[in-house]
Amino acid sequence: MSAISPLAIITGGKRRLGAEIAAKLAQAGYALALVSHLDKEPEAQLLSTLRSCQSEWKSFTFDLGDPHNARPLMDAVTAHFGRAPDLLVNSAAMFGQDDGDSMSLDTLDAHFRLNLFTPLLLAQALVKIASPAKTPAIVNIIDQRIVNPHRDQTSYTLSKQALAASVRTMAVSLGNRARVNGVAPGLVIATDDYDPAQQQRLAAMMPLGALPSPSGVADTVLYLAEANDVTGQIIFVDGGAHLRSFDRDFMHL
């Protein structure tokens, strides 16, 4: 009888960094529940990896900007796979462009709902359905800026700082019922806002002289997924960016 693959839920797991994490977990033998707010296929490279690894996977469409969907998502994943997840990766996030002047109740509410409240409620839902014989892993994707914030994307930054603070609190609160950790990336996948010359300049600003790689973040998630003695920790995968203070977001430098 073949062994049952460990099961991971990855929010925002179909594209960009979430897809990189999903591919790494697929290569490690995980079955995958890939969650997005739109009913779209995963990125082509991730699909290729899923096929080559013959992965068991399923796409789930939920609006996680509404924290009320946390428990229904967990129930849907459990019903489909016939078992509780072993790993929850909270990667989905909202990244708005407000600052201290334009921040509002609406921007704060939207960011905290998706970036904080839903991850917390998903963690709670996972623990409630997990077997007492297992200790599931929860990995929150945070941001290196939590150490040295700048003046851009204020609502986003505040929500990620709150998510970072929740790692230790939830690790204590959940105890041996779940391990809770975080990964704080730097600029790992540049958007169209960055040109190649700017990326080279930014790389030179990092203490390691290079921007971090998406695969480095995925490797760290996999480590924390399987590090049975580790909880309440945040690992920075940022080329050392958190060791420096930047006045603006990278896109403005």
Image: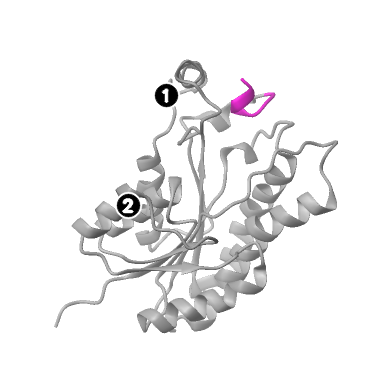
Secondary element type, mark 1 = loop
Q: How is the image coloured?
A: one colour
Q: Nearer the viewer, mark 2 or mark 1?
A: 2
Q: Mark 2 and mark 1 in contact? Answer it, CB < 8 Å.
A: no
The residue that mark 2 highlights is: 46
Callout 2 amino acid: Leu
From the top left corner, tell me how far across and down residue 85 is, in percent: 41, 73
Above or below, 227 against 98 in this view is below
Mark earlier in primary sequence (2, 1): 2
User: Which residue occupies 42% across, 24% down?
Assistant: 210
Quadrant containing the C terminus is: top right
The residue that mark 1 highlights is: 210
Q: Which residues are magenta?
A: 247-253
Above or below, 20 against 113 in this view is above
From the top left corner, tell me how far across and down residue 8 is, in percent: 39, 66
Depth check, front residue: 207 or 74: 74
Location of residue 172 (image quadrant): bottom right
User: Which residue occupies 35% across, 61% down?
Assistant: 226
Quadrant containing the N terminus is: bottom left
In the image, is residue 252 part of the stretch drawn in magenta?
Answer: yes
